[in-house]
Amino acid sequence: MIYDYIQNREDHPDDVTDVAPNYEQEFVNAKSFLQRTSTVTGDNMYDHLTDCLNKILAERPENVIDFFEEYSRKVKERRYYPLTDHLEDIYVPPGRFAFANKIMPFLKPLAPGEPSTVDPDDLEIADMSKNNMLQLLYYFEQTGVGLPRNDMFYLTLSMRKLIHSKPISKIRFWGVIYGIFKNYIILEAELKEEEYIKRNEKLLQDEILPPPPITDETALQKSGEEIEKALEELKHQQDIGGEDRTTKYPRQLPPEPPNLFEEPPEAPSEPSGVGINKKVYFCCNEIGDDWIELPDITPKHIRIARQIYKSFSGFLDREVLTYPEFPGLEKDYLRAQIARISAGTDISPLGFYTFSPGGEGEGEEEEEEEAEEGGDQQKTTYSENPKYDPPPLKDLLDMSVSFWVHHTLYILPQGRTSWWNPNPLPEQGEEMDEEMGEGEEEKEKPIGPEPETGPPLLTPCSEDATLEAVPAWSIRCSSKIAEEYAIAIVRSNLWPGGYTFTTQGKLWQNIYLGFGLKYLEHNFSPTPLPPVQQDYPIGPEIMEIMDPTGAQEEEWRIAHLPKPPPIKIMGGEELGEEEEDEDEDEDDDDDDE
Amino acid sequence: MNLEIILNTLESSGQSGRAITTEESIVLYNSLLILQNENHFRKIYFWGKIFGSDKDYFVAYGYVNDALLGRIYYYSRDCINWGLLPLPKDEAKLLTPLCTTMFQGDPALVIDILIEKGEIALGKVVKEHKVRKLKEEDRLSATIYYLNQEAVLVPRGALFKRPDGVTIENRTFEGLSELESREIKTFLHYRNPTQKWNTNLLTRDDYNYALDFLDPADMDIPEGCFMHHLVAGNTIVLIKPMYWPGMIFFHYIQTNRYGFVYFGNGKKCLDVPFLLLPNL
């Protein structure tokens, strides 16, 4: 072999190197193999490898061997893009384009209003000095909540626009309720008092003049009564006919069961500007949308909202399908939850508000009068304390929460903030409904017409009862390092998402960012259906009785055999009837006796 | 959420109203870097915050090699001193769902759990009243285990399984397109897959052995138990599981930025059937 090899080498003296004999040929072969196009895609290996290596060498990624397959796939994909993208020339607006379009009107300075002779102070445009959302965001961020910075900025602008178009005297950002499909951004506002008066007058008028649909209903009722009368006459005639008949079929039916259920008297809703309707809420799904005012609510909305556990969809006009039935659409439910959350989580540092008439607003007196009309001595108004001296941070951070007070009225189990006496009827039925309602604060429920009471305004949060060992509030300090700049943070545990902060100065703010649902210690269990009521009074007609056996019937017959012979023929008749029905026999027997 | 995102959470988790506070984010950024260095983690992440009534827990995790199975958890109550989170014990896993109270913030606290007679707990009917004890640290560990099992998502393509079985982060991940991100099935559970490998592979037509090895989120029961939003002018996709309110997953569309963070009280919401809404 070796000899042969040497021999061969000697045969070709010019081939000195160790290269395979036909290396050029082999190279060409290999290259042409690699360049062979795929019958399916028309691609070839050679170009693909070149591209891959090019890309890798250009980008020089780390540990490229681990992702080589991915790289190769991406290179391949990219090669096909131009072939498949036939719409390449068509311009596709970026996703944010629509949003930019929507927000642009807010980003232009407000159009100057028509020059009027009214003094600018008399225009009564709501004070926006506390609504610089970017300033608030600075503190919210320290609190651990907040919306993206852009959104906060747009929010300020959009609020500024709103106060020029609506009669608003006070406005503030309330928070966001996150829904399944869309979210609700919510503003809290107080209207000017003329507006409240106008609304309440309109409401009164509506009550005096019942709207047309109700007259339709009465007409319907009337026609219903007529039909009933006609039916009764028919029945009466049948009864008369029945007397002539010898058989008792069809037997006379027992009277139809009357509906004994009486709706418990419904507490009247509080007028706009009072109690649960004291404030007006505006909401929208996305920043840049129009603000939609939420309707005023009735006590029933509140009571039912306490019994259900339902998420928000994000569509205001969607039905709320629950048991017990919610009397309204999602906007009413949203408004009811906002009222409950506000009553539960609106807190302010002790001393910021006082009862002394420090403010100059005329509306307050008005409200007070209205409250008095309601027969309530409860104070419903307060004003900012001009001599407010912020409590020291150490007190604000006290675990007992006694330096924080509620500044929104507690909602009674009745669904109102002031108690309405449903006399002369005691509200038994209502009490039943309220089993779940006492959630806000565990309070002893009054029995009968004893007035329901809640804690008065500006009660310290330390009075709040705990919900099954869950303290109502958790307190945090925003900083452990720089205490001189730290802010105090109060987090609601009963309404997850409710936060309040206060600086060591006079700035404080409530915010709610959550799903709009109350904290439940255990799982939610819906209200059970009421027990089935009895249609008819219990009696032999509707009771199930065992059929007598043949032997029993025989016994009975023998026992009742007529004794005097003259009536023997009658007895025979009876026997015939007896076989037909037992009941009848009984009747006959009674007759005989 | 990785360390770059920690410093500005308002833009990501702020879409759902929660953020890491200014001071915490700065402290976390630095203390987590130190923690990473001490443990020689390849990468370290902030996992979330569990609210306690007295103190809050901060949770972080990192991994050395395997991004899926090799995650090691640490927790802290002040963002500075980190303690190793014990692995969830079987006992704790069984007892945690029975805890109804809130976390308190003291890992050494022992909670009494009353199991009433006739209740079906621990897999069988209990014959008589029992009181079981659970340490809050174990409860924390089990809660995090359950959250990881049920609520944590990653976009498809973000994790890559090497042929040797080790899962790594995919450096070629370029983000989901807008169309893809509208589908819940392009989001995968960040957990050891519970389905067979070929089941997960065949859920897609364009399957890829290295990417489709995790369970897709659309298999979860009931349908629609994730709130799925496209926000900020369709540039961010936001997913919130209804079972664990407070868990926020976000992904910046067509970028490789994604993450999740939890801000909540560590309790599973079992009322999802009442909250579900049919799509219009």
Image (cartoon, grey):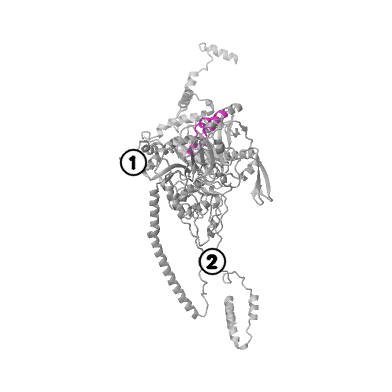
The disc labelled 2 sits on which kind of residue?
Asp
Q: Position of residue B71 (x, y in %)?
A: 59, 33
In the picture, measured across the screen, residue A136 lies left or right of residue A556, that is: left
Locate the C terminus of chain A and report the quarter of the image it occupies: bottom right
Seen at 50% across and 65% down, the residue is A259
Residue segment shown in magenta? B3-31
Q: Which chain contains the residue that carries disc 2? A: A
- In the rendered image, is residue B162 in sight? no
For the residues beneath circles 2 and 1, the answer to whether they share a chain is yes
Q: For the residue carrying disc 2, how many other residues have a C-alpha within 10 Å: few (<14), some (14-19), or many (20+)?
A: few
Provide the secondary structure element on which disc 2 rests: loop
In the picture, measured across the screen, residue B185 lies left or right of residue A590, that is: left
Q: Which numbered dot is residue A119?
A: 1
Front residue of this view, candidates A38 and A508:
A508
Q: Which numbered dot is residue A68?
A: none
Front residue of this view, candidates A310 and A341:
A341
Q: Position of residue A566 (x, y in %)?
A: 60, 88
Front residue of this view, candidates A507 and A60:
A507
Provide the secondary structure element on which disc 1 rests: loop
Q: Position of residue A547 (x, y in %)?
A: 61, 72
Front residue of this view, candidates A201 and A72:
A201
Dominant secondary structure of the residues highlighted in magenta in the image = helix
Q: Earlier in the sequence, mark 2 or mark 1?
A: 1
Q: Which residue is mark 2?
A: A535
Q: Which chain contains the residue that carries disc 1? A: A
Q: Position of residue B45 (x, y in %)?
A: 55, 32
Locate the N terminus of chain A and report the quarter of the image it occupies: top right
**Residue B196 among magenta residues:** no
Instruction: Decide: is A32 above or below A180.
Output: above
The disc labelled 1 sits on which kind of residue?
Asp
Foreground tag (2 vs 1): 1
- In the rendered image, is residue A44 in sight? yes
